[in-house]
Image (cartoon, rainbow, N blue to C red):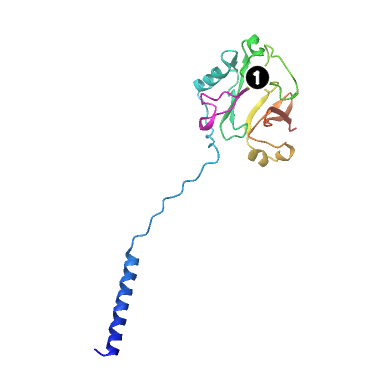
Amino acid sequence: MNRALLIIVCLAFCLAMLTACQRATENKPPVSQAPSNPIATETPRQSVSSPTEAELRAAVKRNYEDVVTIDDSRPTPFMIGDFNGDSSEDIAVVVKPRKLSDLNSEYVNWILEDPHHLQQASMNVSKNDLLLAVIHGHKSEGWRHEFARQTYLLKNAVGTDLETMSLKQLRSSGESRLLPALKGDVIREKLNGSGGIIYWTGGKYAWHPTS
């Protein structure tokens, strides 16, 4: 075999090997990658859902035992929202005093506040007071959770036309420019002839007039 023929045979062999390698690479199945799971940064907020009468009474009983009773004279005695801005559903219920001695005791499991007087050291509830019981939610179950025990009783906080409003709704209504910094949803109402909101300051509930 002369040198020229040998070179031709070598080139043909190299070309055949290169073609075989290319085909093997093309036919190799792709390596699948496991999808990455997003990391949750906060507790998902539960969608707003209307409570049954049994759920409502159970939540009030769990937190206040029998010292208050739900104001059944109202068609809808409750508001639902994320009032403290932790992405867990809270509930506010209009209640009436039932046991004044227990309500006015210093040994209670709730915080009694007047949103109009944040610096007031102490106060008492009278038999004709209407109170707003606010129950903060716990995790995804919200106020329905058995550990939802952070509760407030708000005096001088029950008016008319009570409704929950989000910051987005307040912005669309043009009211947000008049408001303090909000950490969650608010309760808008008319109280003593004036419009306003009850909102969470980060440690208390406060009243802010809007009209």
Residue that mark 1 sits on = 131
How far across and down, in percent of the image, does residue 147 sit?
53, 24
How far across and down, in percent of the image, does residue 153 sit?
65, 20
The amino acid type of the residue labelled 1 equals Leu
Residue 77 is left or right of residue 6, and the answer is right
In which image quadrant can residue 4 be found? Answer: bottom left
Mark 1 crowdedness (10 Å alpha carbons): few <14, some 14-19, many ≥20: many
Q: Quadrant of the C terminus?
A: top right
The residue at 51%/43% (across/down) is 39
How far across and down, in percent of the image, does residue 63 sit?
57, 19
Picture layout, residue 9 above or below residue 72: below
How far across and down, in percent of the image, does residue 123 sit?
72, 16
Count the marks: 1
Residue 137 is left or right of residue 159, and the answer is left
> Which is the main secondary structure of the residues drawn in magenta?
loop
In which image quadrant can residue 98 be found? Answer: top right
Picture layout, residue 163 above or below residue 94: below
Regarding mark 1 in the picture, which secondary structure is present there? strand
Stretch in magenta: 134-151
Picture layout, residue 50 above or below residue 155: below
The residue at 63%/30% (across/down) is 163
Q: Is residue 5 magenta?
A: no
In which image quadrant can residue 93 be found? Answer: top right
The residue at 32%/65% (across/down) is 27
Q: Quadrant of the N terminus?
A: bottom left
Nearest the viewer among 112 and 28 is: 28
